[in-house]
Image (tube, rainbow, N blue to C red):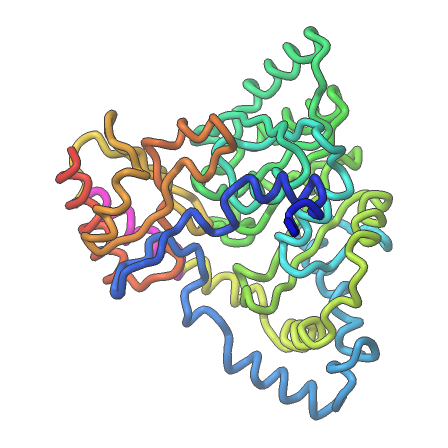
Amino acid sequence: MHPQRFLSPAARLALAYPPPGAWMPPLPPGVVRLSAGYPFPESVPVADLAAALEALLAEEADAPLHYLGSRAMAALPGLIRQRLAQRGIPVGEGELLVTSGACQAIDLAARALIAPGAPVAVEAPTYMEALEIFRNYTDAILGYPVDREGLVVEALAEDLRRRRTAGKALPRLLYTIPSFQNPTGATLSLERRRRLLALAEEYDFLILEDDAYGELAFDPQAAPPPLKALDTRGRVVYLGSLSKVVAPGLRIGWAAGPEPVIRAMAVFKKDLDHPLAWALTARYLQGTDLPARLAWLRQRYRERRNVLLGALAREMPAGVTWTEPAGGYFVWVSLPPGLDSEKLLPAALAAGVAYVPGRHFYFGPAAAQGARHLRLSFSYLPPAELERGVAALARAVRAAG
């Protein structure tokens, strides 16, 4: 028997690509993980979460451990709505769906909004897990360049004009990370945000805004508002998460957008949510000064970014350049001509440092655009390790050059 003959066309399409996470080989012991886009361990409020869990179970006993019935669980959507309102995003009844992290929200949006084979617009480069999700639904992924001001919106506009003139299918969905983008760290300027919303209206597409890092602006007063806060026509489906500001293991994310879209996503979700995680998160949020916590996180991540940038400036040979993000987790490094970050990785691992090669942030043949680039994360490691990792990377670059 050949079990693969029972697989659906969608499953066969998915299996034609490397499995999720294949972008990182096994890491040698002791390697400096500049590849890890995780919160630093001390940022996870273990003691506060433990106290919230103890209080929750003392008050509600077994209720949070059943399918339904926790009073604390029921409070979570309202708490999320309050947070969104404070960011200029009012969300009505039926316009919010709590998900298992932002990745589930991306997948549900893709299921609800992408017709088989239909074109989807993305930044190039972009979040690799989003690419892994989109390719399960279509192989028509259109990439548009990113510079230091984020998505080059005029490149998108010009291609949309060409496609309309040529009678080609236009994308009905554009996925973007406008604030502190993964992997480049770039932030879409306010002018470009407004232009993008105008294009969505002119060419009739929806914007899937992934704002995973939006609350980690090192200078919140200087950061532009979320696209959703500027959206007056219902063009934006906004994705958020507590993974970067509380704890990723809680798996609390959400989508906020037009009620018909959210209703369709909810139909595909089909689960009974996650009562214990929802209830614990609600109790934690109710007992936490989240603005103070965010201010603390911003300062800690700013310090780590500064250490990484300083180490790059001291250690890297001529011809290596990098971005200087105003928030988030990531720095995008460009190698001198002739060097390939994928081919360099084994030597870097041998030298004691890991990173993510740039090609994994592009789709299909466009992956060649990532050959000279790589992503470093400053979020996870303490300053001394950041410096050690950059020094090891610089040694590998010099040896390869």
Queried whether the magenta region covers residue 305, the answer comes back as yes
Q: Residue at x 52, y 62 (%)?
A: 294
Residue 344 screen position, x and y as percent: 25, 40
Q: Quadrant of the C terminus?
A: top left
Q: Which portion, as a residue range, is magenta? A: 300-313
Q: Which image quadrant is residue 234 in?
A: top right
* Image position, residue 3 (x, y; %): 65, 51
In this orientation, does residue 303 appear?
Answer: no
Q: How many marks?
A: 0
Q: 224 or 390, which lies in front?
A: 390
Q: Observer-nearest residue: 73 or 309?
A: 73
Say whether residue 188 is magenta. no
Location of residue 148 in the rendering, given as x and y in whole percent from the top left corner = 43, 31
- Which of the two residues, 168 or 192, is positioned nearer the viewer here? 168
Decide: is 264 above or below 143: below
Q: Is residue 181 left or right of residue 56?
A: left
The outermost residue toward the top is 165
Q: Is residue 377 above or below residue 320?
A: below
Residue 217, relative to residue 300: is it above or below?
above
What x and y, as percent, mark residue 79?
72, 65
Is there any visible trace of residue 98 in the rendered image? yes
Q: Is residue 133 left or right of residue 99?
A: left
Residue visible at 58% across and 27% down in the picture: 191
Determine the main secondary structure of the stretch shown in magenta: helix
Residue at image location 55% in from the left, 18% down from the top: 155
Residue at image location 41% in from the left, 35% down from the top: 359
Q: Is residue 179 above or below residue 47?
A: above
Q: Can you tell which quarter of the image residue 63 is in? A: bottom right
